[in-house]
Image (spheres, grey):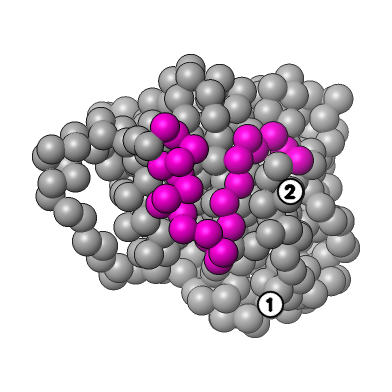
Amino acid sequence: MKAAMLYGIKDLRVEDVDTPKVGAGEVLVKVKAATTCGTDLKIFQRGYVERVIKLPTVFGHEWAGDVVEVGEGSDWPRKGMRVRAGNSAPCLRCFMCQKGKYNLCENMIWLWGAYAEYIKVPAHMVRVNMQEIPSHISYEEAAITEPLACVLHGIEEVGVKLGDSIAIIGAGPIGLLHLLTTKKMGAEKTIMIDLVEERLDFAKKLGADETINAAKENVEERVKQLTGGYGADVVIEAIGRPETWEQALKLVRKGGKVLEFGGCPPGIEIRVNTELLHYNETTVLGTFHATPLHFRKALNLIASKTVNVAPLITRKMPLEKIEEAFEILATSKSEIKIAIQP
Ligand SMILES: [Zn+2]
Ligand SMILES: [Zn+2]
């Protein structure tokens, strides 16, 4: 089969590799669509922690497809079923899993290999984090289950409430998913912040109430102005840079909450003024990844169109052009997610 192998930073090659053999309980899926994501782009551009991905590997983690083979001893799924799975499956047994923090599982199984003709899903993942896709949604939409699951987890932890004002730093795919979701939750006002005008225009089209171009405007002043002088109830950082992590702390009202969502490169520290935590009672939290429950919820919300993710897919490209796809993502101002079609 053809697969996009990642060898290192900016070294992605489409090669002929062996189609995986299916063992007991495992499932082989013909990938119909695999969507690009900010994490993929970060790994492509600057590498990633070994804990999560070991190179060389078949790349990509957001996908959906058709079941073509089911290993022995499994009565679900059946051949021909449209499914999505992963990209993670917690062990359900370790200390963190026993605490119910499945996203922090000590023995998490990660599945890479979406940018390929076929992907093999491990037996444990079939049981823990594989879902059937309803027939009325596209494979591309179903592939977005993974990032939406992470966003749902973050929003749940930070506790967005009806009538909250929300400031979101970063109008990329993750920031936009936060926008779509918080709008649906009844945010009174959503404010999108980015450096790129095209992205802000796109956010407006998706329903952002206000946009701030951080390259041209004083973000702190504008957010205060738009929130009666107080700052937003909830601020979400969806970029993953120390500057914007620190900026998020300055945009929140007294007693408000900051969700530091974007992952920074390893070893980064930020400065936090103690008065902010003490006198202002600011809550600051980070969230990582999602649990199988969030994956299920995310797929259901996509299926019901409660969160309409279709507009986020701005282009479709064949697997052979995957390197070009990442070059486009790295340089383009208006591209959000590219659906790779093996
Ligand atoms: Zn992703
Ligand atoms: Zn575990």
Q: Is residue 57 above or below residue 249?
A: below
Quadrant (top left/top right/bottom left/bottom right) for the N terminus: bottom right
Q: Quadrant of residue 142 in the image? A: top right
Residue linked to disc 1: 12
Evaluate if marks 2 and 1 touch, with contact meaning CB atoms under 8 Å apart: no
Q: Is residue 125 visible?
A: no
Which numbered dot is residue 202? 2
Residue 319, position in %: x, y? 83, 65
Q: Residue at x 57, y 80 (%)?
A: 9
Q: In the picture provided, is 226 more to the left or to the right than 68?
A: left
| Residue occupying the point 40% across, 52% down | 220
Q: Position of residue 30 (x, y in %)?
A: 81, 48
Q: Which residues are magenta?
A: 205-228
Horizontal and vertical percent position of residue 44: 60, 73
Q: Give above or below for 203 relative to 325.
A: above
Quadrant of the frame with the C terminus: bottom right
Q: Nearer the viewer, residue 289 or 224?
A: 224
Pick the front one: 3 or 261: 261
Does residue 139 appear to the left or right of 24 in the view shown? right
